[in-house]
Amino acid sequence: MSDGKADNIDLAALEGRVDQLIRTVEQLKTENSALRSQQDNLINERAVLIDKTEQARTRIESMISRLRAMETRS
């Protein structure tokens, strides 16, 4: 093989590798964006669940207080 052909083959291999790396970076950017969106959704869902839990706790504590008050009146 002449040096020119070897250089062309090396350059083509390098170009192929660079193209592959570019595709990989684009794929990772897309995945990263999707994961960030999913994380935001989960954070919001967690906040809603914490709020619902706090509301339930307040209602239960209120019911317990009313039951105790009813016991004392009896």
Image: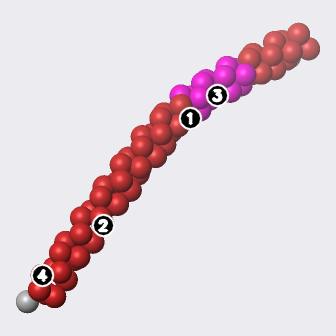
Residue 30 among those drawn in magenta: yes
Which one is earlier in the sequence, the residue at label 4 or at label 1? 1
Would you call the spot at circle 3 few (<14 residues within 10 Å), some (14-19), or many (20 or more)? few
The picture places residue 70, in percent across and down from the top left corner, at 12, 81
Q: Which region of the structure is painted magenta? A: 16-31
Q: Are marks 1 and 3 in contact (CB under 8 Å)?
A: no
Q: Position of residue 7 (x, y in %)?
A: 86, 15
Residue type at mark 2?
Arg
Residue 66 left/right relative to 10: left
**Tag of residue 25:** 3
Q: Is residue 43 placed above or below 28 in the rendered structure? A: below
Closer mark to the observer between disc 4 and disc 2: 4
What is the quadrant of the C terminus in the image? Answer: bottom left
Q: Quadrant of residue 54?
A: bottom left
Which residue is label 1 attached to?
32
Cα gap from disc 4 to disc 2, whole angstroms: 20 Å
Dot 4 falls on a residue whose secondary structure is helix
Between marks 1 and 3, how big is the CA–CA gap?
A: 10 Å
**Residue 40 in the image: above or below residue 73:** above
